[in-house]
Structure formats: C-alpha cells, structure tokens
Amino acid sequence: MSAEQKLSERSVAEMLLDWEPVIGLEVHVQLATSSKAFSPSGTAFGEPPNSLTDPTVLGLPGALPAFNRHALELALRLGVATSSQIRAKSRFARKHYFYPDLPKGYQISQYDEPLCEHGHLDLIVGAELKRVRLQRIHLEEDAGKNLHAGTVSHVDLNRAGVPLVEVVSEPELTSAEEAAEFMRALHRLVRWLDISEADMEKGQLRCDANVSIRMRGEDRLGTRTELKNINSFRFVQHAVEHEIARQLRIIDAGGRIERETRLWDETLGQSAPLRSKEEANDYRYFPDPDLPPVMVDGGMMGGILKTLPELPAVRFARYQKELGLSPDDARLLVSERGLADYFDACVAAHPSQRGARNLANWMLTELLGALNAEGKSITESPMPAPTLSALVVLVENGTISGKIGKEIFEESFRTGEPPLAIVERRGVQQISDEAVLAPVVDKVIAANAKQAKDYQSGKDGLFGFFVGQVMKETQGRANPVVANDLLRKKLGR
Ligand code: ADP
Ligand code: MG
C-alpha cells in the first residue's frame, strides 16, 4: 500500500467517526423449480444456448404465460420463514425496458402488490443475532444473458423466464461486513428450506447493494448509489467497502453524491458508473393482463407451516443457551442443515444433554475430518449419529481413553463395526481399577529404583517418566487419573 493510500485510508477511518454508512440490499434468488416461471421449458444450467426456450420465453405473439405453482410454494416458504405478511391476493406487473436479453420488452415482476412484506432476516454477528427488516419479497422472472465476444454479441435465453424471488432489505445495514453477512444469512436460509441451491457461481443468488452515507445522528437518508449484480460474499464486502470510501472522499472534497448505478470490478478493485438511475415511472409498470392474481389460501399456508423446519438462527441461539456450545461451534453447525440435523440426532441418542459439547467436538473434528478426507458430505456419512454418540459415551464414562477413542472412531468409520464391539474385541478398555493398577505401579517403581530415588530427592520432572512407564506396561490402557494417584502415593511425594 502506498503512503498516499495509507493516508487516505486513515482519513476514511476518521471520517467514519462522523459519518454513518447505510446499506440496503436487493437479493435475487433462483427458485429450484424444474420448469420456468410461466412456461414448460426446463431450467437446467449449462445446456446448449437457447435450447430451453418456448413461445412464451421468446415472447412470440399469442403466447400466454401460466404461473408455476411450485415457484409459489417455494416463495411462500421463504415468506413464512422470514415472518413476512403474506398477501392473500398478490399481482404480477409488467416492468418495461428495452434490452436484447428480454424479447418481450418487459419483465414479469410484482410491483405494488408483492407476495410478501415486512418480514425480517436474522444475521449471525459474533455470538449474537442481528435482526434486519425486509421491505418485501416478490416474485419475478429472470432475463436472458448477453455474451460479448470481440465485436460480436450473442444472446442466450436459457435463463429467461427462470423463477426468482427478489428479497429487499430495509436500509439498515451499517457496514460492508454486515452486508456480506446478510447475503450469507439468506444463502443459508434458502438452502436450509430447499428453496434454492443458491449456487452463486451459477448466478442463483446475486445482489444489488444500495449504499449511502449520512452524518451520525441524522434521520434522513443520504443519496444512494446502487452496485449491480454482485455474486459473491467477498465481492459484496469489497464493493461496499470501496463505495463507502469513495463517497466519503467525495463529501470530504466538498462534492455531492450522484444517484447512479455502478458496476463493481473485482479484478480492478473499483467500480465504474453504468447509468444514471432510472425512476420507477421509466418502467411504465402496469398489472399484467395475461396473468390472474396470485391467490394464497389457508390450506396452502397450513401446509407450509406444518413442514417448516426449525430455522438456523433459532438453532444457533438454542445451541448456545440450552446446550452450552461456543458461538463458533454453534455457527459451524448451523452453516448447513445436514450438519445441524446430524448433531441434533447425536444429542438425541446421548443419555444426557451435558454430552452436547463433547458431541460437537467429536463431530466437528473427527467426523468432519474423516468425511473431508473422503470428499463426502455429512449426509453421506457412513457413521450414523447414534454410533458417534455411543463412542463419545464410551470415552465419557471412562471405558476407553480419548486417545484410544480416536482409534476406535477410525475403525468404526471405516468398517461400520459398532464401537463397543471393537473395544471388546481389541481388549482396549481403560483400566481404572486400583487393585489391577497397583501391582503395575509397584513393578515399575521396583524396576526403576534409581529414578525413584532421584524423584524423591527433588527431580520433579521424573514424574512424567513414571506415568509413561505405567502406560507402556498397560499398552496405554491405564486410566491416567488413577495411575497418577497411585504413583504419587507410592513414590511418596
Ligand atoms: P429501487 O432500487 O427499485 O428504486 P427501492 O427504492 O425500493 O427500490 O430501494 C431498494 C433498496 O435500496 C432497498 O434495499 C432499500 O433498503 C435501499 N435503499 C433505499 N434508499 C437507500 C439509501 N438512501 N441508502 C441506502 N440504501 C437505500
Ligand atoms: Mg434497485
């Protein structure tokens, strides 16, 4: 970093004492349906260009859209999971603009009567949850894709008409980290609910970030810019960070922020203006006359409520409060529903809730380590949750030592043999019985009379040597607590 850059970075940090960043995100999430929002073409990724089209997608005269009910169910799941108000009767609107990837000349979206409003999304920030309010979640269709190759441009309409929800936050995120966290929370939630695979490399989750700054203590919002189409957690953080600094410098130099749309270039690490922002009336929104209103009834809502799983943010809090897990372990476990479900199954199979922390440890280190090494996910684990739980119990109740436990884990993971059976076959039970260990300790002391003398005359470091000898005599099976006690007693110090 150059001296000049350093200077300006410092002044950004200083200006942030007086100025508050405000960020609102609009996130597009592709709904995991097999056919398009308003027509029967497929939605697979990576098919030959323009192979997934039909008269409706192409906007041919006379083609009529029919709304995909599965898309509605998926959107409703998200609405319910974010505690949104659901409109019993919402409406599709046409949003007009001219672009080669939009053959109809308008996008089917929702405007003044969206499906969901006033929900919220809980972010995980450190050990806490931060609740961010949502303005709305509405249904719309995706556009196609323009590909520019040298002087030629191509249009691929495979993505045109794919169903999306747009999740719009209130302007109440206050840092680039929080903006990235919002995207992470939404990504986790839609995957958790099986609404979307949310594969960001395939464009299935992407966001526009609206950024402004205002004097601290000011209620009114500043003029915002909008950063378009950001498709990674890291990029959103960089883009917003950069935009906050850019706006601060403009203000610092006595300038004004222009309302505009900008494009973030991650490779260059900077954004460039794309266009000055269009107003809603430029789009000439009006209700789509080809589509009836979207009706949601009690039966549909009941079905969704019945099948809604416990949400990641709720589990994150529960794991800490009820099970005493660390925030880090809790966050890791709720990063994927498969992990959290496996963990819950371990806890359910364990005789006491107090085993939760040990279970989390064994699961996150031994099990995930072994799965990783084989490139397997948690849902492909060859070791069922009750088996891991049984192994942890054997360590907890002293049947085997932690060290032997790891060996047993490995064998059980590999062969599927139950841990207890392996322990019995191998005869590796920990020896905790004093009556069994006492003669071993006597023998070790007798065989090392000189070291015993040295220890007794003050060479404390030799104690470890005796522990080691007892372990060697018992092939590592001596209970270290009992062995230490006996050694202390018999060595006489
Ligand atoms: P549009 O982008 O379609 O004009 P809205 O006006 O509804 O839509 O706002 C879209 C997003 O911009 C929302 O996420 C909102 O929180 C955010 N937003 C609006 N005003 C500001 C502002 N001054 N600063 C930061 N974000 C803002
Ligand atoms: Mg916008």
Image (tube, rainbow, N blue to C red):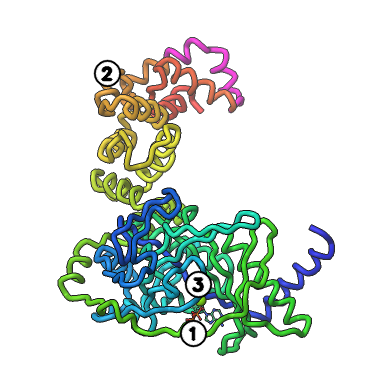
**Residue reaching furthest to the right:** 3
CA neighbours of label 1 inside 10 A, class few (<14), some (14 to 19), many (20+): few
CA neighbours of label 2 inside 10 A, class few (<14), some (14 to 19), many (20+): few
Q: CA distance from mark 3 to mark 2?
A: 59 Å
Q: CA distance from mark 2 to mark 1?
A: 74 Å
Q: Residue at x 45, y 32 (%)?
A: 373
Q: Nearer the viewer, residue 274 or 484?
A: 274
At label 3, the amino acid type is Leu
Q: Secondary structure at mark 3?
A: strand
Q: Is mark 1 within 8 Å of ligand 1?
A: yes
Q: Residue at x 48, y 25 (%)?
A: 492
Q: Is mark 3 within 8 Å of ligand 1?
A: yes
Q: Is residue 450 left or right of residue 248?
A: left
Quarter of the image with the N terminus is bottom right
Q: Nearer the viewer, residue 318 or 120?
A: 120
- Asked if disc 3 and disc 1 are in contact, CB closer than 8 Å, the reply is no
Q: Which residue is mark 2?
A: 425
Quarter-wise, where is residue 106 in the image? bottom left
At label 2, the amino acid type is Arg
Whole-percent x, y for residue 226 in the image: 58, 74
Q: Which residue is mark 3?
A: 25
- Asked if disc 3 and disc 2 are in contact, CB closer than 8 Å, the reply is no
Whether 191 is among the magenta residues is: no
At label 1, the amino acid type is Ala
Whole-percent x, y for residue 371 in the image: 40, 36
Q: Comparing marks 3 and 2, which lies closer to the viewer?
A: 3
Vertically, is 243 above or below 367? below
